[in-house]
Image (spheres, rainbow, N blue to C red):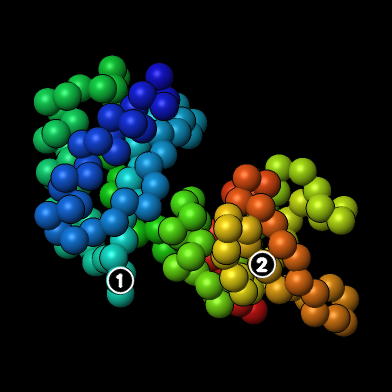
Amino acid sequence: MMSNVIQTTEKLVEPILVKRDLELVDVEYVKEGPNWFLRVYIDKEGGVDIMECGEVSEELSEALDKEDPIKGAYFLEVSSPGVERPLKTKKDFQESINKNVHINLYAPINGEKELEGVLKDFVNDVATIEYRFKHTTKQIDISFNQIAKARLAVAL
């Protein structure tokens, strides 16, 4: 059911975003305590503002009411992904070269399941990460299919 809600929401929000020149970053349908939340993260070059989020929310709410993919109460939230934006697609990785990233792996590489560093390159579905280990700088190549989760990271 959750994947159906996410797919339907993606289908409904896409034309709303296209006409505003906005990008869909992510859709989540999660239960927190007794409540269900449908979260839609949108972005554009330079970021989105609260007015854009509000307009998308209103139009998406109407579309969801017509389609009615969710049986029961939920809260709809439309927002920016923030500074630690998730990296979901290969395009996201390509656009994040030379930015600080945090990567979670499905299985450890060299004993590490989490890495944080600079995404130096993304070629042939392989991310090259430069990171600090003790007092040295190292590089590691990670295949896209080894990455469980990735996001931009605020550099310290």
Which residue is labeled 2 in the image? 128
Q: Is 31 in front, or is 148?
A: 148
- The Cα–Cα distance between marks 2 and 1, rounded to whole angstroms, is 24 Å
Q: Is residue 108 left or right of residue 5?
A: right
Rendered position, 59 above or below 67: below
The amino acid marked with disc number 1 is: Glu
Rendered position, 84 above or below 137: above
Q: Is residue 83 left or right of residue 45?
A: right
In the rendered image, residue 103, in percent from the top left (x then y), is placed at 65, 57
Q: Can residue 84 be seen in the rendering of this structure?
A: no
Q: Is residue 3 left or right of residue 42?
A: right
Earlier sequence position, callout 2 versus callout 1: 1
Which residue is labeled 1 in the image? 45
Q: The C terminus lies in which quarter of the figure?
A: bottom right
Neighbours of disc 1 within 10 Å: few (<14), some (14-19), many (20+): few
* Residue at 12% from the left image edge and 43% from the top image edge: 59
Q: Is 28 in front, or is 97?
A: 97
* Residue at 61% from the left image edge and 51% from the top image edge: 144
Rendered image: mark on residue 62: none
Rendered position, 138 above or below 56: below
Q: The N terminus lies in which quarter of the figure?
A: top left
In the rendered image, residue 57, in percent from the top left (x then y), is placed at 20, 47
Say whether marks 2 and 1 touch (CB < 8 Å): no
Q: Secondary structure at mark 1?
A: loop
Q: Is residue 75 left or right of residue 147?
A: left
Residue lying at the far front of the rendered structure: 124
Q: Quadrant of residue 137?
A: bottom right
